[in-house]
Image (spheres, rainbow, N blue to C red):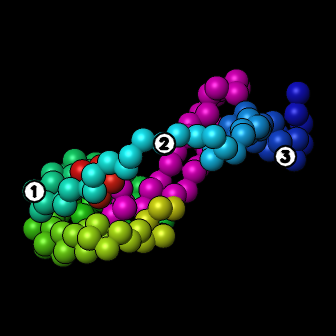
Amino acid sequence: MATTNSKKGTVLAKGFFPQKPHLQDPSEGAIYPEACCKADGVTEEQICRQLKKLKPYKAPGPDGIPNMVLTKCTDMLVERLHWIYKAMLKKGLQYKPWKSFNTIVLRKLGKLLRLQWALIVQLVLRGELVAST
């Protein structure tokens, strides 16, 4: 049993992040199908629908914008977000910070087993909105 913080951290890291399997280079002798068609545009209705699905009292992601702001200001944000997503899809751009997330591991109170941990992932929201439409 791990008794020091360092050993506990090592055990926790091994439990959540096992070693990567050894993989061959995928380009060796691979035959790929033809690329599918380009992504369809995102509509204002789709963005609005995704904003309304947000749970308002969840903790904000790395950008610090609470879901409550996004759900209460949907009518002011939809048109602006639509133009941003439309330009990004048209030009094939991906805003790097939107692809980042925080992973937080919390121990459930009163639980001793390794499986009794809660894994929380905070995504940067605007990237998630366009990915989920």
Q: Residue 103: within the magenta?
A: yes
Label 3 residue SS: helix
Q: What stretch is highlighted in magenta?
A: 101-128
Left or right: residue 111 compared with residue 77: right
- Amino acid marked by disc 2: Tyr
Q: Residue 5 carries which label?
A: 3
Instruction: Indicate the position of residue 61 as horizontal and vertical percent values.
Output: 44, 61
**Residue 128 picture location, percent across and down:** 35, 56
Q: How far apart are marks 1 and 3 (CA)?
A: 49 Å
Front tag of 1 and 3: 1
Asked whether, in this view, residue 36 is left or right of residue 23, the answer is: left
Point 70% across, 24% down: residue: 113
Decide which of 24, 80 is in the foreground and name it: 24
Would residue 123 be seen by someone viewing this image from the given angle? yes
Query: What's the residue at 50%, 48% (across, down)?
Result: 121
Q: Which residue: 62% across, 28% down?
A: 116
Above or below, 30 relative to 100:
above
- What element does badge 1 sit on? helix
Mark pair 2, 3: CA separation: 47 Å
16 vs 54: above or below = above
The residue pinned by badge 1 equals 45
